[in-house]
Image (spheres, helix red, strand yellow):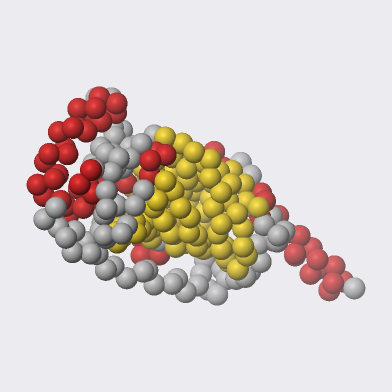
């Protein structure tokens, strides 16, 4: 009887542990977007991922947080395409250096995170790209490991997801000479591993957010207006010379 009570007490303490995950290693994280158009497959990826995820308990519905990606860090394998991805017509990386996914809550048929057990969930929140925001629901596979599990001192949460966005919803423009080579629907896939630790209820990490970096003094609107017409002529001379498709392999699966 005493043994059973002790085990129940331990289970309660584990479920009540509050964890903040705010450490991201580049080699463990990758975000990929894919444009599959009739004339070309474009794949770009980045490991420049940051964020903070908060788990007041192991209840799945209690988790929240945000994940940010540096928009200027996407690479496709062809430099001229990378310039277009960063350009004012696309991600406008100079004035909007971060894309942000804010997770307001998770919905799942499971009640709690297991230990090293995959659970399916839907993240409800807001995605922000180029300063434009839209509500979004993202299906994800999650796998949680508490601190000191398998000899690793960190708490870890793996997040695998795939979802679609329409680039036009965020003000991105497809140049006329790229109509057949760029799909307005982008498929975004993530393979993320957030690391953290158990924290006290009064820890400043609970109120921490990822700030946006400073941007040039000129307004975003003036930048877009002044470059939209001018860049079309400049890019048409260089982009059309790059005709080969990109064949970047998909990222390796993370082994926890």
**On the rendered structure, is 85 left or right of 130?**
left
**On the rendered structure, is 58 left or right of 68?**
right
| Residue displayed at 61% across by 41% down | 202
Q: In this orientation, does residue 77 appear? A: yes
Query: x, y percentage for residue 221?
Result: 29, 26
Query: x, y percentage for residue 210?
Result: 43, 41
Query: x, y percentage for residue 240?
Result: 14, 52
| Residue displayed at 25% across by 24% down | 222
Q: In this orientation, does residue 197 appear? A: no
Residue at the extreme right: 1
Residue in the foreground of this view, choosing between 10 and 117:
117
**On the rendered structure, is 112 left or right of 233?**
right
Residue in the foreground of this view, choosing between 213 and 107:
107
| Residue displayed at 42% across by 56% down | 188
The image quadrant of residue 44 is bottom left
| Residue displayed at 51% across by 56% down | 196
Query: x, y percentage for residue 114?
Result: 66, 66
């Amino acid at each position: 009887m005493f043994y059973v009570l002790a085990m129940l007490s331990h289970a309660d303490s584990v479920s009540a542990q509050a964890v903040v995950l705010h450490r991201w290693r580049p080699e463990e994280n990758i975000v990929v977007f894919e444009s599959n158009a009739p004339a070309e497959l474009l794949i770009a990826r980045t490991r420049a991922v940051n964020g903070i995820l908060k788990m007041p308990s192991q209840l799945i519905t209690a988790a929240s947080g945000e994940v940010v990606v540096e928009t200027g860090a996407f690479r496709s394998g062809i430099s001229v395409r990378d310039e277009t991805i960063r350009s004012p017509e696309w991600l406008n990386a100079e004035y909007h250096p971060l894309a942000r996914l804010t997770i307001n809550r998770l919905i799942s048929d499971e009640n709690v995170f297991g230990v090293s057990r995959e659970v399916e969930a839907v993240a409800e929140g807001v995605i922000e790209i180029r300063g434009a925001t839209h509500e979004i629901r993202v299906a994800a596979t999650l796998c949680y490991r508490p601190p000191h599990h398998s000899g690793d001192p960190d708490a870890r949460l793996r997040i695998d997801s795939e979802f679609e966005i329409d680039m036009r919803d965020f003000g991105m423009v497809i140049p006329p000479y790229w109509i057949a080579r760029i799909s307005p629907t982008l498929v975004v896939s993530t393979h993320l591993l957030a690391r953290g630790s158990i924290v006290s209820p009064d820890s400043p990490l609970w109120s921490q957010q990822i700030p946006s970096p400073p941007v040039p003094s000129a307004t975003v609107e003036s930048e877009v207006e002044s470059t939209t017409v001018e860049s079309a002529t400049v890019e048409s001379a260089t982009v059309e010379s790059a005709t080969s498709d990109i064949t970047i392999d998909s990222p390796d699966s993370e082994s926890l």
